[in-house]
Image (tube, rainbow, N blue to C red):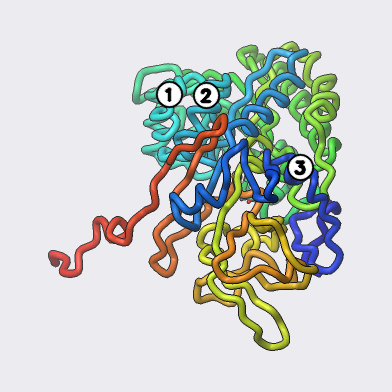
C-alpha cells in the first residue's frame, strides 16, 4: 500500500483495497455509457474523438467546469465574494476564457500565467498574483499592469515591491499571504500551510510587514491571504485558516491600517479521485462564512482543482500487453510525461476502458513509454482482462495539474487539448510537433569569448 487509500483523504495509490466509487466518478466527470456501452463525454463519443485527434489527448468537459463554478459561486452567495481560478491547475486558453465568461477572476503565479490570463480576456483588476519567488521583472510587470493585488510572501518581497512602486510613481495594491500554520491531512508535497515551509509570511513577522508598509507609501494593503493546502476533504483546516485571517486583520487594524478590502482564503477544496467523499461547496461555505462574514469584507477564494479536476480525462491507447516477472503490464502511449501525478505523488487516478469493459478484473501495472521505472499511471490496478492492444482507456481526474505539469522528456511532444461543449468538440490546443520541440536550438552555436 502506498501513501493512503482512496477515501482516506490522501493522494495515494491504494493498490490493495481501492474503494473506488466508479458511478460517482463518472458522474463527476460528466461521462456516461451510451446504448452500445461506449463512453461519451457530454454526448461526444470518445472513441470517435480519439480517432480524429489521435492519442494521447486531454479532453475537458465545459459543462462540468460550468457546474463546478456555479456550485462554488452559489454556495457563497450569502457573502460578497470573488472566485479567482488558480491558473496553475489548468492554463489552457479555452478553459480560462470559459471561466472568465462565468465571472471568475484569476490567481496567477508567474508572468507566463499573467500573459495567458490577459490573452484569455481577464481584466487586470480581476487578477491576483501569488507565488513565493516573483522576480524583479515580474513584480514590475504586475505593478504596471494594475492587478487586483500582488500577494507577497515575505517581508523582503514586500519591501522590493515598495521600491518598484516608488520607481513607477504609482500606488500598487498589495496583499500579504501569511503562513496560517495549519496542518492538513494531505500529501506532504502539497501541504502548504504549515509553519516552517517556504510559503507565506510567518504570522510572527506581521509586525515587521506592517513596519515596511508604513515606510513604503506606494503600497496600499488591500488583502490578507492564506492558502492552507490542496486536495483537502475536511472543513476544519479551512475554518482554522479563516480564523487566522480574522486575527491578522485585527492586528493590521490595530496598527492603524484601514485599507484592507478582502480576506483571501486561497484554494484547496478537494475532489473525488477514487472513493473520497469531497466537501460539498455548501459545507465549505458553512465552515468559513460565519468566521469571515463578521469582518464585513469581500471574501476571495482561489480554487483550482475543484473547478477543473474532474472535468478532464486523458485518453490513451494500449500499445502492448506484456507479462513480466509474474505481472501483467499494459504499456500505453501516455505516461508520466502527460500525467505526472501518479509517479510524483503516488496519486490515484481511476482508469476506465472507453469500449464496453469485457472480462473479469485482473491486476495490471499501467505504464508509459518513458525510460524510467517510475513511469506508471497505476500499479496493480484491477482492470477488465479483455483489454488488448489498440484499446482506448480514459484516465480520470486529469483536468487539474495534468497537462500543465507535463514534460517533453524523451523528446515527447505535448499532447493536444480538446474542449467538449454541448455535444460538440473543438481543438483547444493542437498536438506539438517534434520540430517545435527544437525551436530556438542551434546545433552550431556562435561562440563568444
Ligand atoms: N492558491 C494558492 C496560493 C496555491 O498555492 C494553490 C495551489 C491554489 C490556490 C490552488 O489550490 P487547489 O484549489 O487547486 O487545491 N500539483 C499538485 C497541487 C499543487 C497545489 C499548489 N498550490 C497536485 O497535483 O496535486
| N-terminal label among 3 and 1 | 1
Above or below, 85 relative to 358: above
Q: Does the rendering let one see residue 202? A: no
Whether residues under marks 3 and 1 lie with C-beta atoms below 8 angstroms apart, the answer is no
Whether residues under marks 1 and 2 lie with C-beta atoms below 8 angstroms apart, the answer is yes
* Residue 423 x %, y %: 56, 33
Query: Mark 3: few, some, or many residues within 10 Å (few <14, many ≥20)?
Result: many
Q: Quadrant of the C terminus?
A: bottom left
Above or below, 57 relative to 429: below
Q: Which residue is mark 3?
A: 181
Looking at the image, which residue is at 52% across and 21% down?
Answer: 101
Q: Which residue is mark 2?
A: 100
Image check: 241 left or right of 449?
Answer: right
Above or below, 235 relative to 370: above
Check the image and name the residue furthest to the bottom.
Answer: 325
Looking at the image, which residue is at 77% across and 13% down?
Answer: 78
Whether residues under marks 3 and 2 lie with C-beta atoms below 8 angstroms apart, the answer is no
- Residues 144 and 94: in front is 94
Q: Which residue is mark 1?
A: 121
* Residue 428 x %, y %: 44, 39
Query: Mark 1: few, some, or many residues within 10 Å (few <14, many ≥20)?
Result: some
* Residue 410 x %, y %: 42, 69
Above or below, 32 relative to 358: above
Image check: 306 left or right of 285?
Answer: left
Amino acid at each position: 500500500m502506498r501513501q493512503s487509500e482512496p477515501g482516506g483523504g490522501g493522494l495515494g495509490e491504494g493498490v490493495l483495497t481501492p474503494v473506488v466509487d466508479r458511478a460517482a466518478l463518472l458522474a463527476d466527470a460528466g461521462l456516461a455509457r451510451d446504448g452500445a456501452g461506449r463512453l461519451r463525454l457530454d454526448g461526444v463519443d470518445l472513441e470517435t474523438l480519439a480517432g480524429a485527434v489521435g492519442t494521447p489527448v486531454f479532453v475537458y468537459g465545459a459543462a462540468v467546469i460550468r457546474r463546478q463554478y456555479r456550485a462554488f459561486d452559489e454556495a457563497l452567495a450569502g457573502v460578497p465574494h470573488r472566485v479567482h481560478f488558480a491558473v496553475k491547475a489548468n492554463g489552457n486558453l479555452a478553459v480560462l476564457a470559459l471561466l472568465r465568461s462565468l465571472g471568475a477572476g484569476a490567481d496567477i503565479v508567474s508572468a507566463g500565467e499573467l500573459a495567458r490570463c490577459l490573452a484569455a480576456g481577464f481584466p487586470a483588476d480581476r487578477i491576483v498574483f501569488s507565488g513565493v519567488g516573483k522576480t524583479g521583472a515580474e513584480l514590475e510587470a504586475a505593478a504596471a499592469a494594475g492587478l487586483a493585488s500582488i500577494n507577497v510572501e515575505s517581508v523582503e518581497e514586500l519591501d522590493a515591491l515598495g521600491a518598484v512602486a516608488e520607481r513607477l510613481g504609482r500606488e500598487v495594491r498589495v496583499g500579504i499571504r501569511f503562513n496560517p500554520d495549519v496542518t492538513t491531512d494531505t500529501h506532504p508535497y502539497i501541504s502548504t500551510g504549515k509553519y516552517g515551509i517556504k510559503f507565506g509570511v510567518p504570522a510572527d513577522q506581521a509586525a515587521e510587514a506592517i513596519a515596511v508598509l508604513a515606510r513604503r507609501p506606494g503600497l496600499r494593503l488591500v488583502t490578507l491571504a492564506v492558502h492552507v493546502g490542496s486536495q483537502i476533504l475536511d472543513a476544519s483546516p479551512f475554518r482554522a485558516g479563516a480564523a487566522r485571517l480574522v486575527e491578522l486583520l485585527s492586528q493590521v487594524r490595530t496598527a492603524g491600517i484601514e485599507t484592507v478590502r478582502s480576506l483571501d482564503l486561497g484554494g484547496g477544496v478537494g475532489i473525488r479521485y477514487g472513493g473520497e467523499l469531497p466537501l460539498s461547496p455548501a459545507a465549505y461555505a458553512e465552515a468559513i462564512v460565519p468566521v469571515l462574514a463578521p469582518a464585513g469584507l469581500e471574501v476571495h477564494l482561489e480554487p483550482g482543482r475543484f473547478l477543473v479536476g474532474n472535468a478532464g480525462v486523458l485518453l490513451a491507447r494500449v500499445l502492448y500487453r506484456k507479462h513480466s516477472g509474474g505481472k501483467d503490464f499494459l504499456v500505453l502511449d501516455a505516461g508520466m510525461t502527460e500525467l505526472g501525478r501518479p509517479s510524483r505523488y503516488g496519486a490515484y487516478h481511476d482508469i476506465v476502458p472507453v469500449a464496453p469493459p469485457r472480462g473479469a478484473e485482473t491486476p495490471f501495472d499501467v505504464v508509459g513509454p518513458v525510460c524510467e521505472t517510475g513511469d506508471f499511471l497505476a500499479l496493480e490496478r484491477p482492470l477488465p482482462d479483455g483489454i488488448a492492444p489498440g484499446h482506448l482507456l480514459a484516465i480520470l481526474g486529469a483536468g487539474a495539474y495534468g497537462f500543465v505539469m507535463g514534460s517533453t522528456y524523451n523528446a515527447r511532444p505535448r499532447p493536444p487539448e480538446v474542449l467538449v461543449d454541448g455535444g460538440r468538440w473543438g481543438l483547444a490546443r493542437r498536438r506539438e510537433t517534434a520540430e517545435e520541440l527544437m525551436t530556438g536550438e542551434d546545433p552550431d552555436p556562435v561562440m563568444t569569448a
